Image: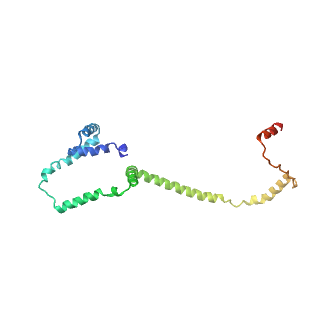
């Protein structure tokens, strides 16, 4: 994932190996082709070579230094502890989540923070809008003019509708299911 957004990142590790002379020949040719095109990587290579030159002959400079047995024991324990380190204690799903966090979320944390801020603003606007809708749902008290004209409107409606006579209800036909062939003939007759 990181290589997609920063293609030179993969070459940086190889530049370090090239500076100390530990890069495989096949990778060296690819790296030299990239260095011919990328000025940033050439600058990084110059810095790495400047740092690696004093360390190039460390075997001869420090051949007379011999670590004590306690130091060797401490190193062995540190190496074994690192081998049983955090990644060994994590399950496969935790490793996947940790990798996703490192490669997707952490490099873009400013973007995620901005999105979280936008979500908070949208949530606040939704809550404030729902409060005003509840208040707007309650009907305000009627105007005095409306309350005065309501009886007049009621009388006018009663005059237009006529006398309030009871109407005779038409009895409903009982429903009995019939085959569709019979129903079709009835619709053709009517």
Q: Is residue 68 left or right of residue 127?
A: left
Q: Is residue 139 left or right of residue 114?
A: right
For this rendering, which residue is in front, 136 or 85? 85
Q: Report which quarter residue 35 is drawn in.
A: top left
Return the residue found at the far front. 179
Q: Count the marks.
A: 0
* Placement of the N terminus among the 4 image quadrants: top left
Instruction: Tell me what residue is drawn at x 25 percent, y 57 percent.
Output: 79
Answer with left or right where residue 69 lies relative to residue 15.
left
Residue 186 point in image, percent of width and height? 82, 39
Q: Residue at x 44, y 52 (%)?
A: 114
Percent across and percent down for residue 147 are 76, 60
Residue, far bottom: 70
Residue at the spot 20% in from the left edge and 48% down from the top edge = 52
Residue at 36%, 46% in the rendered image: 2
Tell me the quarter of the image containing the C terminus: top right
Rendered view: 64 above or below 7: below
Query: Vertical placement of 110 versus 189: above or below?
Result: below
């Amino acid at each position: 994932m990181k290589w997609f957004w920063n293609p030179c990142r993969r070459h940086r590790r190889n530049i370090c190996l090239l500076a100390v002379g530990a890069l495989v020949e096949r990778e060296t040719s690819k790296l030299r082709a990239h260095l011919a095109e990328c000025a940033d990587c050439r600058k990084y290579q110059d810095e790495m070579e400047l740092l690696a030159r004093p360390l190039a002959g460390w075997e001869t400079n420090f051949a007379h230094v011999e670590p004590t047995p306690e130091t060797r024991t401490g190193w062995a324990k540190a190496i074994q502890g690192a081998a049983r380190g955090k990644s060994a204690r994590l399950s496969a799903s935790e490793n996947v989540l940790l990798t996703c966090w490192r490669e997707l979320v952490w490099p873009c944390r400013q973007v995620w923070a901005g999105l979280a801020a936008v979500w908070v603003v949208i949530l606040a606007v939704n809550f404030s809008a729902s409060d005003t809708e509840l208040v707007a749902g309650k009907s305000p008290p009627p105007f005095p003019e409306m309350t005065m004209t309501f009886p007049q409107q009621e009388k006018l409606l009663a005059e237009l509708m006529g006398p309030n006579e009871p109407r005779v209800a038409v009895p409903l036909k009982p429903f009995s299911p019939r085959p569709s062939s019979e129903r079709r003939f009835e619709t053709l007759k009517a």
